[in-house]
């Protein structure tokens, strides 16, 4: 592995609560400002989630976190009305649920080491190790992996197929808490620790088909690519929605290229005219053409069998646990 994903991923929940604890009486901040102090405005929605789950409203005054338009938003300590009363007691002027003169009371002076910036730098370092050359040796197995969540509890499934016969030969399902929350473009840091136990048996003759993008990504380095580089294995990304790029050209053997800035970054595969496309891209240690052909080899339904059955297995594990 390129790094130990569990030990080196920051506790973003704690980091967020520590930041909000810095907001002084008589001042407010916004979800976006806290996200920027974490290192990326993309974390704004997570900050809102963290505030909704805050159980220490004395140390972490989430009442002082409002929306960027000045409206107070929700409050885990008793609802918006109580939030308004508490803020007004601290000298914050509020009219019609909106903080007046927000710029005058806005706190932005956080002491922070920007944990998400550190993760972004790590992604850029890993991206430089991306290998999109054709895999020279023939594959013996294809392992489909998917993860289902119940809040922060994860259920990960791996379904393994024989490459030549197309028959399922084994499957594994594990569960555990996700240490890192969902933040757009940082998904790999949430999923890599979860799937780590499943990856122990993956060798150079196995290609991993993961439910997520590889190069079909605005940065050319989606979760499937990062998984491939971290675990030093071949990976193929399978996505149900087009994240970026443009589907172009005519349909040839069930496939159309997806391009961005004149470069092929993946393929849209359609089993037949009635079935919507699935979007396939190289993750790591395979070429775009290899990724396309591997996915087509297992395309019995809209989604290739390895990831389709892994998705079903992970969802079934989650439902079984929730029914207890």
Image: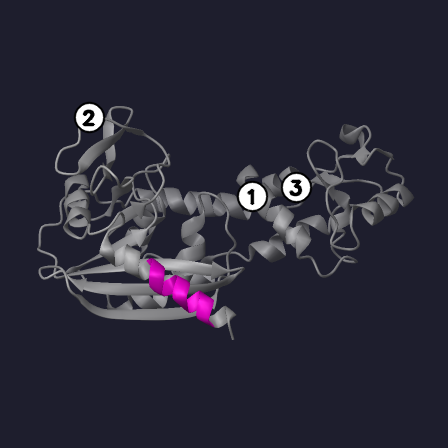
Q: CA distance from mark 3 to mark 2?
A: 43 Å
Q: In the image, is 95 to the left or to the right of 170?
A: right
Q: Kindly identify which numbered label has been placed on residue 249.
A: 2
User: Residue 264, located in which quarter of the rendered image?
Assistant: top left
Q: Secondary structure at mark 3?
A: helix
Pointer 3 residue? 31
Question: Does the rendering let one see residue 233?
Answer: no
Q: In this rendering, is residue 7 above or below 251? A: below
Q: Kindly identify which numbered label has been placed on residue 64.
A: none
Q: Earlier in the sequence, mark 3 or mark 1?
A: 3
Pointer 1 residue? 43
Marks 1 and 2 close (CB-CB < 8 Å): no
Q: Residue at x 41, y 57 (%)?
A: 191
Q: Residue at x 22, y 40 (%)?
A: 269
Residue 215 picture location, percent across and down: 29, 40
Closest to the observer: 50 or 294?
Answer: 294
Magenta stretch bounds:
311-320
Q: CA distance from mark 3 to mark 1?
A: 9 Å
Q: Secondary structure at mark 1?
A: helix
Q: Earlier in the sequence, mark 1 or mark 2?
A: 1
Q: In this rendering, is residue 221 above or below 256? A: below
């Amino acid at each position: 592995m390129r790094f130990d994903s569990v030990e080196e991923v920051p506790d973003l929940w704690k980091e967020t609560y520590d930041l909000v604890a810095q907001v002084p009486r008589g001042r407010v901040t916004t979800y976006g400002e806290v996200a920027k102090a974490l290192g990326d405005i993309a974390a704004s929605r997570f900050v809102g989630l963290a505030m909704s789950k805050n159980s220490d409203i004395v140390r972490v005054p989430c009442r002082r976190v409002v929306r960027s338009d000045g409206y107070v938003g929700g409050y885990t300590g008793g609802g918006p009305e109580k939030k308004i009363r508490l803020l007004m007691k601290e000298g914050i002027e509020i009219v019609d649920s909106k903080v007046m003169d927000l710029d005058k009371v806005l706190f932005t002076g956080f002491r922070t080491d920007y944990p998400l910036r550190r993760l972004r730098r790590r992604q850029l370092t890993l991206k430089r190790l991306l290998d999109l050359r054709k895999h020279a040796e023939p594959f013996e197995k294809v392992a489909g992996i998917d993860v289902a969540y119940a809040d922060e509890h994860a259920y990960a499934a791996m379904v393994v197929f024989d490459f030549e016969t197309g028959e399922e030969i084994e499957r594994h399902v594990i569960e555990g808490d996700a240490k890192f929350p969902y933040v757009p473009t940082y998904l790999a840091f949430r999923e890599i620790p979860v799937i780590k136990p499943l990856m122990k048996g993956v060798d150079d003759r196995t290609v991993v088909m993961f439910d997520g993008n590889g190069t079909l990504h605005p940065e050319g380095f989606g979760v499937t690519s990062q998984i491939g580089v971290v675990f030093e294995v071949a990976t193929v990304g399978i996505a149900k929605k087009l994240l970026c790029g443009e589907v172009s050209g005519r349909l040839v053997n069930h496939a159309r290229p997806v391009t961005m800035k004149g470069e092929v970054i993946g393929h849209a595969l359609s089993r037949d005219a009635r079935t919507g496309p699935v979007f396939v891209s190289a993750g790591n240690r395979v070429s775009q053409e290899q990724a396309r052909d591997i996915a087509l080899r297992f395309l019995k339904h809209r989604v290739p069998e390895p990831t389709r059955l892994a998705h079903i297995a992970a969802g079934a594990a989650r439902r079984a646990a929730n029914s207890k």
